[in-house]
Image (cartoon, rainbow, N blue to C red):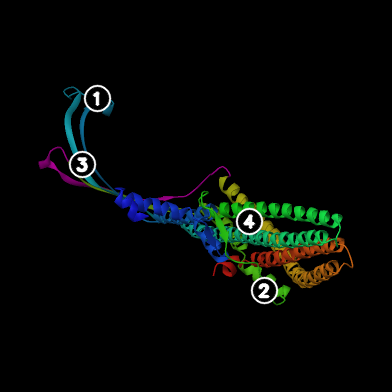
Amino acid sequence: MLKTWIKRGIPLSLALAWTALAQDTAPLKLTLKDAVGLALKQNPQVILANLQVSQSEQDRRLARAGLLPQANGSVSEAVNRINIHAAIGISFPGLPTHAGPFDVFQAGVSVNAPVFDLTLWHSYRSSKMGIETSRAQETSAREESVMLVVSQYLGCQRAVADVSAAQSRVQLAQAIYDQSADLQKNGVGTGIDTLRGNVQLQNEKQRLIMAQTQLETSLNGLARLLNVDPHRSLEIADQASFSDTPAVPLDQTLEKAYSTRPELHALRSEEERAALAERTAADQRMPKVNFSGFWAQQGLTPDTIIPVYQYQGSIIFPIFTGGRIQADRAKAGLAIRQLQQQETELRNRIALEVKNAIAQVESARNEVTVANAGIQLANEEVTQARDRFQAGVANNLEVITAQDELARASDNQIGALYRYNQARASLAYAIGQMEAMYAK
């Protein structure tokens, strides 16, 4: 096709661009690991968290700059005219009333350097702690993003399984209907059996339509989380599977959650910053030592330029602040108490999440075992019912009933498998291991 376009005179660049566009609109087939990796690259919340870390880095650089000497260069030329009488506040006989106009040229460097200022040092330390807080918040955003993507992907897997099961039920219903129609045609079956089989077939087709719609909406939700081009469709590459996991000791899991959950890291970093803010407020009573200086070449004409300079050291200490320092210390102390209460509440919530996740994993594992046995028994029931109907021992009411039982058993199996995989994801999130488990 590309050669045809070139022969017709279409430029090669346009042909390649059209081909690339066609490739971009092709369905994007993703495994669970691919979906998680894509989310960590282009999910808006993760991107915002990364930008927050970069902003904290710049805040640290600004705080560090306050500790370092600052130097500025200047070049100026001014035209001055001075009222001498107004400048000295009195007039003398013979003293001219003014001087000038005259030019003054100046070029030099000014320096300002803090020698001793604990508040600036504490501000720099606080900015470094802010980086740790931002990194913990970034990790938290990544964990939440992975959790959302994994949950949505598992939902898509469930929807795919529902569609596959619905298609199998439609095929079974079609076979039962054809069997009923053949028996009626041969004078063995009845019209009510054929009608009953047709009704069941239409019901199964309706369930298939609903399952296909649910799959489409689940894939659209996944595309939204992954920030994929709306014009590009998604496909699921991984099939739902059961992977048995050993029992998890609660004590070990809980301690691991306390040591790895990024929310706790961020909160502890905020507590350290609040404690430093309280110390900073107290250190405002300490004197501040500063050095400043100026050196320049100054003169009325280039021939009269001479060096001029001024060096100054100063000590500043508070005498009366109107209660500002006490208020700053009290405010920092209240912030520490608030953060401590938040940490206690967060630890309790993490413990609850871990306990619930472990219980859900154990329950879902047992559900899968029971559901697998149920689907096997339901298949045997359908086979025996069809054999009895074919032999004329019973009507197809037994077959329809067995088919309904098979559909229920299939739904139970799909739901149990989904809940088990979702419970595993919830446990990984509860102990802060979502990215470690699903992205590597």
Of residue 191 and residue 198, the one placed in the foreground of this image is: 191
Q: CA distance from mark 4 to mark 2?
A: 44 Å
Q: Which residue is mark 4?
A: 336
Image location of residue 156, percent across then percent down: 64, 59
Of residue 291 and residue 4, the one placed in the foreground of this image is: 4
Q: Secondary structure at mark 1?
A: helix
Q: Secondary structure at mark 4?
A: helix
Image location of residue 271, percent across then percent down: 60, 59
Q: CA distance from mark 4 to mark 3?
A: 53 Å
Of the two numbered discs 4 and 2 in the rendering, the one whose residue sits closer to the viewer: 2
| Mark closest to the chain's N terminus, 4 or 3 | 3
Q: Which contiguous range is marked in magenta? A: 299-323
**Is 388 on the left-hand or right-hand side of 9?**
right
> Is 71 placed above or below 396 here?
above
Of the two numbered discs 4 and 1 in the rendering, the one whose residue sits closer to the viewer: 4
- Label placed on residue 243: 2
Three-letter code, disc 3? Gln
| Mark closest to the chain's N terminus, 3 or 1 | 1
Q: Residue at x 34, y 53 (%)?
A: 4
Image location of residue 29, percent across then percent down: 53, 61
